[in-house]
């Protein structure tokens, strides 16, 4: 009935308004009446036209005359307070994760890092690998790393610019963020893992290469990432960042070059070299 104006809209966050107190059911496929604190309502088809369906409407009467209308004969005064208005406005802009709890694995991850992370004299942070089990055994995946490296060499031969950017990036990493594995150390079976890597370009930053280390490379059904605990999601939401961006007159944005390469891995007898 498009000629009947809407008098009241009830959101699904107030189910107490439309909670049934009494129900009168008809035959199968017939409409039924339900009573709430607003009065009686009809759910189902109440008109002769097949497309006229009414659902959860509070009514006082249904007339069979030509001017039949579904109306509400009770008056309710809406009380609006500043606190309610503020709560309504902030409801869609809350970046807090309510009800999100960490798993046992995520709690163990934080426990290992909180108890063992330390700051070195040079300012860098050092931490252990968050292994699932201290006596983890990995297969010797050197054949996989060599296969990836041979494919990388072929790409170097076909793309000189890619080779130049790749070598420049890796030289910077090796000079400032890496150390050579001691060859005099006895190789421990199950404790050595080779990480293959490749280079990618950012679509919006042409000419700037990023070398990605693939710790998820699977060899004999095992990868390094599978042996590490999953970290909890503690990244600030973009919505919260944008909202806090407007709180103060000055905002600061920074980019840490080689951020993940600034962390040192603590050497341990039960760890991975």
Image (tube, grey):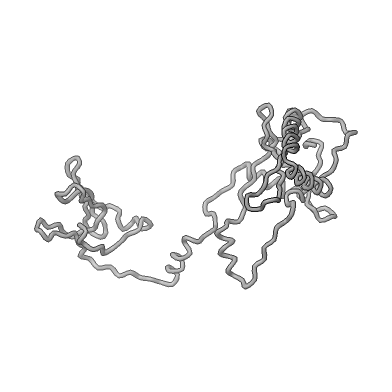
| Furthest residue in direction right, as rendered | 184
Q: Residue at x 64, y 67 (%)?
A: 251
Position of residue 100 in the picture relative to residue 37 (left or right) = right
* Residue 256 falls in image quadrant: bottom right
Indicate left or right for 225 with 127 as reference: left
Q: At which x and y percent is residue 99?
A: 52, 51
Q: As drawn, which residue projects farthest toward the left? A: 65
Q: Is residue 206 visible in this depiction of the protein?
A: yes
| Residue 140 percent location from the top left of the image | 76, 28
Q: Quadrant of residue 222?
A: top right
Q: Is residue 178 above or below residue 6?
A: above
User: x%, y% of residue 64?
Assistant: 10, 56
Q: Is residue 85 above or below residue 119?
A: below
In the rendered image, the quadrant that contains the N terminus is bottom left
Q: Residue 44's x, y, as percent? A: 22, 48
Q: Is residue 72 above or below residue 44?
A: below
| Left or right: 63 as drawn, with respect to 117 | left
User: Image quadrant for the C terminus?
Assistant: top right
* Residue beneath the point at 54% across and 58% down: 95
Count of numbered circles on the image: 0
Determine whether, in the image, residue 273 is placed left or right of residue 198: right
Determine if residue 195 is in view: no
Q: Nearer the viewer, residue 35 or 235?
A: 235
> What is the quadrant of residue 30 in the picture?
top left
Compare residues 96 and 158 and report the one nearer the observer: 158
């Amino acid at each position: 009935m498009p000629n009947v104006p809407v008098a009241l809209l009830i959101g699904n966050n107030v189910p107490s308004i439309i909670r049934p107190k009494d129900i009168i059911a008809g035959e199968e496929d017939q409409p039924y009446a339900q009573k709430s604190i607003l009065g009686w309502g009809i759910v189902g088809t109440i008109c002769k036209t097949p497309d006229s369906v009414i659902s959860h409407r509070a009514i006082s009467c249904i007339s069979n005359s030509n001017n039949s209308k579904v109306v509400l004969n009770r008056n309710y005064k809406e009380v609006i307070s500043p606190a309610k208005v503020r709560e309504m406005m902030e409801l869609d802009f809350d970046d807090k994760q309510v009800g999100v709890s960490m798993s046992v694995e995520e709690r163990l991850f934080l426990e290992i890092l909180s108890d063992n992370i330390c700051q070195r004299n040079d300012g860098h942070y050092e931490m252990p690998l968050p292994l699932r089990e201290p006596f983890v055994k990995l297969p010797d995946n050197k054949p996989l790393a060599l296969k990836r490296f041979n494919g990388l060499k072929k790409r170097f031969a076909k793309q000189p610019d890619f080779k130049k950017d790749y070598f420049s990036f890796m030289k910077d990493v090796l000079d400032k963020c890496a150390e050579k594995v001691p060859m005099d150390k006895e190789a421990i079976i199950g404790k050595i893992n080779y990480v293959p890597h490749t280079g990618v370009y950012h679509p919006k930053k042409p000419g700037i290469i990023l070398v990605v280390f693939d710790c998820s490379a699977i060899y004999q059904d095992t990868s390094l990432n599978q042996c590490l605990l999953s970290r909890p999601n503690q990244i600030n939401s973009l919505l919260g960042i944008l909202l806090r961006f407007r709180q103060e007159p000055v905002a600061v944005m920074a980019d840490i070059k080689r951020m993940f390469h600034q962390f040192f891995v603590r050497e341990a007898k039960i760890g991975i070299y």
